[in-house]
Amino acid sequence: VLRDLPRLFARQCAVSVEDNDGQFLLIEGADFLPDWITPENSDDRLFIYDGHVHLVDLDQVPEGPDLLQRSLKFLAAQAQACKVSP
């Protein structure tokens, strides 16, 4: 459902998943994440968008105010640049 929901809205919906332990996708994919990502800098960087997982890199969108809005804007404009799933 989480992967299909963004496809139904054709690039108008990005999904981020959290539970009591934190960001679900980061926890499940921890063995495959790049070295730069840590629990401290991972908020507002991992999304399901257009049916794929995307990770917005620090080089693409630096830390700072309005990170969620800036990450979503980058994702909408350059989804291929941060796509991490086939």
Image (cartoon, rainbow, N blue to C red):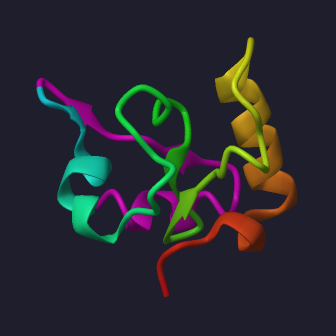
- Asked if 34 appears above or below 12 in the picture, the reply is below
Task: Give residue 85's position: percent from left, percent from top.
Answer: 47, 78
Magenta stretch contains residue 38: no
For the N terminus, the image quarter is: bottom left
**Front residue (pair 35, 86):** 35
Task: Give residue 12's position: percent from left, percent from top.
Answer: 69, 50
Question: Residue lying furthest left in this view?
Answer: 20
- Asked if 45 appears above or below 19 in the picture, the reply is below
Question: Residue lying furthest front in this view?
Answer: 35
Q: Who's the residue at 79% across and 50% down the image? A: 60
**Front residue (pair 74, 61):** 61
Residue 9, quarter of the rendered image: bottom right
Q: Is residue 34 left or right of residue 70?
A: left
**Front residue (pair 4, 52):** 52
- The magenta stretch is 1-20
Q: Who's the residue at 56% across and 61% down the image? A: 54
Task: Give residue 75's position: percent from left, percent from top.
Answer: 73, 52
Q: Who's the residue at 13% across and 29% down the image? A: 21
Question: Residue lying furthest bottom in this view?
Answer: 86
